[in-house]
Structures are given as C-alpha cells and as structure tokens.
Amino acid sequence: MPPSIVLRSSQLIANLDALRAHTAPAELMLVVKDDAYGLGAHWAAETAVHAGVRWIGTYDVGTALALREALGPETRLFAWATSADDEVAQAIRGDIDLGVGSMEYLERVIAAAERLGRNVRVHLKVDTGLHRNGIAPAEWAEAVRRTLGAERAGSVRLVGVWSHLAEASDAEDDAAQALFHIAVREAEELGALLEHTHLTASAATWERPELRGSLVRVGAFCYGVRSADGPEIAELAPVASLTAPVVAIDGDGVSVGIGSLDGLPSSLSGRVTVGTPAGARALLSIGLTSTRIASWAGAAVGDEVVLFGPGRTGESSPTTLAETIGTVGEEILTRLAPGIQRRATDEIVDRA
Ligand SMILES: *Cc1c(COP(=O)(O)O)cnc(C)c1O
C-alpha cells in the first residue's frame, strides 16, 4: 500500500453538525479554497451538500464552476477572487455568487452581466482594516449606489455585504466589526435589501458569537484543523489521517514509505509522535522518501503507521505538528504532494 490520505466523511459531517449547532441561527458556508486545504474540494463540498449545507465558498471561479457541474443548481457557490473578464462571464452563466472588493472589479462585473443580458448576485466587500482586498470606507457609498443602480437596471442583485478579519487580536476584530456595521447600515440606508452579511472565518465564528453575521465562512474548523496555539475544541476532530506502511525493520527503528519529497516537513524529525499498532511512537527522522519511527514489539513490514490524524492510535493532529515547527495546520495539509492517494471512507468515528 502506498501512503494515503484517509478522509473520514462521517467526521466531516460531525464537524459540520457541531458548527451548525454552535453558530445557529447563522448559516454555514463551507470554504473549500486551496482544494479544501489539499483534502479535495469535490469530496468536501459533495459531503457537505449531502449533509444539508447550502453554501460553498471556493475563492476562485474555476473551482466554483467545477462544483456547479458536480452539485447541480441548488447550492450557492461563492467565489471572491478578482477574476479576468472571461471567467466573470463563465461565473455569471454558472450562477455563481461573486465577491467584489474593488470599484474596478465592480465595473467589470456589471459590464459582463450587461453584455450577457443576465443577472449576477454580488456580495460587496468593505475593507475593515486588512487592506488586502475590499472597498475603502471612503468609496463605499459610491460602490453601493453604483451596484443598486445596476440592480434597478436588472443586471445585478446586491445580496451581501462582507469583510474578513485579521484574527490577530480581539481589539482589532472589534474595531473591524464596528466599521463593518457602519458599512452595512449605510448600504441598507441607500436601499440595499441584503440577504446576508458575513464577516467571520473559523476562529472568530466559534469563539466570538457577537461578531457573526447571518452567514459564517468556515474552512479549517470544518476539517478539524484548530487554530495554531488555540484551544482544542472537543466537538471538532481532524477529518484526515496520513498513513504509510512499514517498509523495513532495522534494529530499534522501522522505516515507513513516506518522506520529505511527499511533503512531510523534515523539521518534524525527533519532535513528534506518530500512531502505530502499539500506540504512540517517536518519529526519529524524516528522509527524502522514508521516515524512521521508534519500533514496537511485533512490528512487521506492511503495518500501517499514522503520521497525523485524530489521535486514536497515538498520532498528533495536523495542528500539533504545525505548532512544533511554527506554522499552521492548513500548511501541513496543503504541502502534501498532490500524487498521494486521497481515499474517502465512511467509517463511523468513535468520538469519545
Ligand atoms: C480562508 C478564508 C476563510 C476561511 O478561513 P478558515 O480560517 O479556514 O475558516 C473565510 N473567508 C475568507 C475570505 C478566506 O479567505
């Protein structure tokens, strides 16, 4: 057996259920950007829609269009990457909700909808302090007026106002929320009939209920990736495990068939434990194509070692690995080589 990423659909559903219970009445948007942090956007989105999730956030238009094909017309697909005109036209034909964070992009989206004679749903993004993408407060009223003008002309529906938080400190997020509320109120005073407001991603969605809008955009926590240096959350567990077989036994170590060329950061050498049939064992060193693990009684070639996962056989979670080397759990997932097999299971997970 080659190394594989084992995806537990039932755990993804359990996490989605826990998030929805925790954040109701806000509605959940599953974020599947970066191919669902390397786990597979199609698997994640299809599982979530099966479990009743109505909103999927993709970042890019291409992924949104592929998911439109896979999921059918009912699911709301939100793409917020500023995109080239041909992609915008495809998105409008594909009934994708577009996130718009600049006047320049707004004009191109309106022009594309007019050219196609179609109506496009727009979520205007206000800059609340990140200064990445977002309409500056000084331009906000103009952007809303322009969008509502296009709405009256039949090419646009202004369905949402949104922003993104730094999640660096509560004080900064509070200040961002204050700006966000001003922008929402201004849009409504100008005549917008908003379907949704949305501001928070994983950590703020879970920990700061007062910051949630009517929709929450959550990626990491759905996959059981907690915040680096953040608390464990009992209701959420990793949906993915990375497994590799024992390929050789030598002295007090065994070698498993996965290494840094597969995306395992070699800086983890000597610093974490992995799961084995006998429980937790030290990860001794990571080579290019194999990794040495402290042995156990009865170890045999072909035994399965769990490099990370929910912790049931002694392995660390992706976030615990990440903390060891000063990064975030998403990075551990997205670095894994695309060639590693992704394998979905419907195993019922013991969440005790
Ligand atoms: C990545 C992202 C999210 C989801 O972030 P998580 O921390 O993974 O929950 C939400 N909104 C935007 C705009 C993002 O870029």
Image: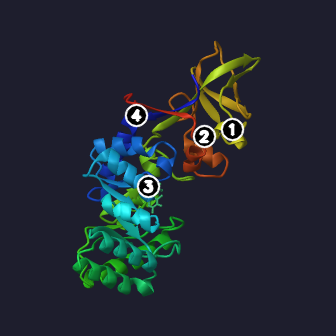
Q: Nearer the viewer, residue 242 or 124?
A: 124
Disc 1: residue Cβ within 8 A of ligand 1's nearest atom: no
Residue type, numbered disc 4: Arg
First along the sequence among labels 4 and 3? 3
First along the sequence among labels 4 and 2? 2
Residue 351 badge: 4
First along the sequence among labels 2 and 1? 1
Residue type, numbered disc 2: Ala
Q: Nearer the viewer, residue 92 or 25?
A: 92
| Whether label 4 touches label 1, CB < 8 Å | no
Q: Which percent across, then down, holds residue 351?
A: 40, 34
Residue type, numbered disc 1: Leu
Q: Say what secondary structure mark 4 lies in.
A: loop
Q: Is residue 31 visible?
A: no
Residue 284 vertical placement versus 176 (above, below): above
Quadrant in the rendering for residue 191: bottom left
Q: Is residue 306 visible?
A: yes
Residue type, numbered disc 3: Gly
| Foreground disc of the pair 3, 1 | 3
Identify the colour scheme used.
rainbow
| Whether label 2 touches label 1, CB < 8 Å | yes
Residue 162 vertical placement versus 249 (above, below): below
Local packing at callout 2 (Cα closer than 10 Å; few below 14, some 14-19, many 20+) is some
First along the sequence among labels 4 and 1? 1
Q: Is residue 228 left or right of residue 259?
A: left
Q: Tell me the residue that label 3 is attached to.
A: 62
Q: Tell me the residue that label 1 is attached to.
A: 261
Residue 276 vertical placement versus 131 (above, below): above
Q: CA distance from mark 2 to mark 1?
A: 8 Å
